[in-house]
């Protein structure tokens, strides 16, 4: 009798091990610690937070996968994706023809252009890059803005900065004549009050306007299909608007 019970228990245990357990797929998502409000390092929780983190988390919930956020510099995101270190890019990354040759993007999520940052002591109402001809300006390495600025041939130098806060600091202290970066990120940083001697030039009209999308590896067609389907659903049910509202941005057509 005891032997029978032991055999039955062993069979039950084997059946439990052998039975398929529907463990949720976990995908690694590359995000940056310096793109507030899109992505940033929350020092209270020591985790990456922001619009794009909220968005990919909600997409994952709808599409049936969990996300593991991997913090990294913006300029390393695409290389990390193509080398399989991460599965998805969810950051303030423009969908550009050059990037689309290397990775695939979801449908657009949010569109904007570059903002112009100058010291508060500079009260000139710049309207275009031409107004800064011959000056030393700065932009973040790896962004669409830095290459566009260099191609104009207008400036005596285009300094490449690792992060947007680095640009803000140099403009704030007067070490840099002007900086160009994602308008929403500049506006959010200035709103926090950490750079009181810098200002956004509201009269400036951006020359590089793009749309942010979620990046996946070439060939990950099934994942891209899931992301696009969930993104469309979240736009339709108002979830994306709520995410943008949470971080102080207005919903817009893209």
Image (cartoon, rainbow, N blue to C red):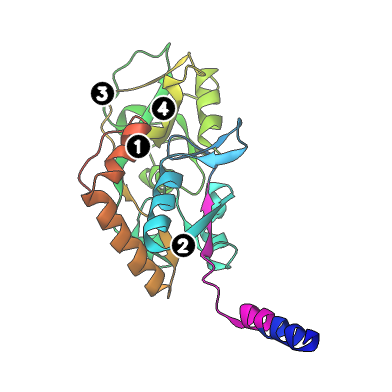
Marks 1 and 4, how far apart in space?
Answer: 13 Å
Tag 1 residue: 114
Q: Of the residues tagged 2 and 4, which is closer to the observer? A: 2
Marks 2 and 4, how far apart in space?
Answer: 30 Å
Q: Residue at x 25, y 57 (%)?
A: 232
The magenta-colored residue range is 12-31
Is residue 6 shown above or below 213? below
Give the x, y percent position of residue 144: 40, 48
The answer to whether marks 3 and 2 mark residues whose Cβ atoms lie closer than 8 Å is no
* Picture quadrant of residue 112: top left
Q: Of the residues tagged 1 and 4, which is closer to the observer? A: 4
Marks 4 and 3, how far apart in space?
Answer: 18 Å
| N-term-proximal mark, 3 vs 1 | 1
| N-term-proximal mark, 4 vs 3 | 4
User: Residue 114 vs residue 67: left or right?
Assistant: left
Front residue of this view, candidates 32 and 160 = 32
Mark 1 Cα shell of 10 Å, populated few (<14), some (14-19), many (≥20): many
Residue 219 visible? The answer is yes
Give the x, y percent position of residue 165: 53, 30
């Amino acid at each position: 009798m005891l032997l029978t019970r032991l055999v039955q228990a062993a069979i039950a245990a084997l059946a439990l091990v052998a039975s398929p357990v529907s463990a949720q797929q976990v995908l690694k998502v590359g995000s940056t610690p310096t793109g507030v409000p899109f992505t940033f390092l929350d020092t209270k929780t020591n985790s990456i937070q922001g619009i794009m983190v909220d968005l990919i988390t909600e997409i994952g919930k709808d599409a049936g996968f969990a996300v593991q956020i991997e913090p990294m510099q913006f300029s390393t995101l695409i290389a990390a994706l193509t080398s399989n270190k991460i599965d998805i890019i969810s950051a303030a990354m423009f969908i550009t023809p050059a990037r689309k040759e290397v990775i695939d993007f979801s449908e657009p999520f949010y569109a904007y252009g570059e903002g112009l940052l100058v010291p508060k002591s500079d009260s000139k109402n710049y309207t275009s890059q031409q107004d800064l001809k011959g000056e030393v300006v700065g932009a973040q390495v790896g962004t669409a803005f830095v290459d566009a600025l260099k191609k104009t041939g207008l400036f005596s130098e285009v300094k490449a900065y690792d992060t947007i806060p680095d640009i803000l600091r140099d403009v704030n202290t007067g070490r840099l004549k002007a900086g160009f970066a994602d308008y929403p990120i500049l506006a959010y940083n200035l709103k926090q009050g950490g750079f009181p001697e810098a200002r956004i030039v509201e009269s400036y009209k951006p020359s590089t306007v793009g749309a942010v999308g979620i990046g996946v590896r070439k060939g990950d067609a099934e994942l891209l299909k899931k992301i696009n389907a969930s993104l469309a659903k979240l736009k339709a049910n108002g979830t994306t608007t709520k995410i943008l509202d949470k971080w102080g941005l207005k919903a817009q057509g893209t």
